[in-house]
Image (tube, rainbow, N blue to C red):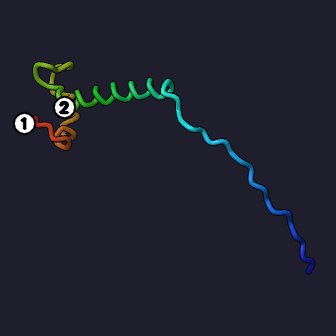
Amino acid sequence: MADVSLPAPTAVPVPVPTAIPLRQVLPWAVFGAVLALVLLYFVGVEQGVLSVFAGETVHEFVHDGRHLLGFPCH
């Protein structure tokens, strides 16, 4: 059997991005914060005088989540 030697593979440098500019991150961070506050409102506060929707539909839908996060509702 003949011994065939292959050339060693060479490494190609890959450019690594240093950081994401704040201008690209800021809109997504604001969107995430607003979405989190809306979800926190519906889970924690949506009932009684401050309710956006009439009735108990939202309260019953997020009932277990309220207890999981420590909000009293009874």
Residue 9's spot in the image, x, y percent?
Answer: 79, 59
Nearest to the observer: residue 74 or residue 60: 74
Q: Does 4 appear above or below 15? A: below
Residue furthest to the right in view is 2
Look at the image and tell me in which quarter the C terminus lies: top left
* Residue at left offset 38%, top offset 25%: 30
> Could you classify mark 2 by the number of other residues whose Cα lies within 10 Å: few (under 14), some (14-19), or many (20 or more)?
many
Measured from the top left, where is residue 1 in percent x and y?
A: 91, 81
Quarter of image, res 7? bottom right
Classify mark 1: residues with Cα within 10 Å, few (<14), some (14-19) or many (20+): few
> Mark 2 or mark 1, which is nearer to you?
2
Circle 2 sits in a helix, a strand or a loop, which is it? helix
Nearer-N-terminus badge (2/1): 2
Residue 52's place in the image compared with 10, above or below, is above
- Residue 44's label in the rendered image is 2
Q: Name the amino acid type tagged 1.
A: His
Q: Nearer the viewer, residue 60 or 48?
A: 48
Identify the residue under disc 1. Answer: 74
Q: Position of residue 35 (x, y in %)?
A: 34, 27
Measured in 3D between alpha carbons, the distance from the residue under mark 2 to the one under mark 1, in whole angstroms, is 13 Å
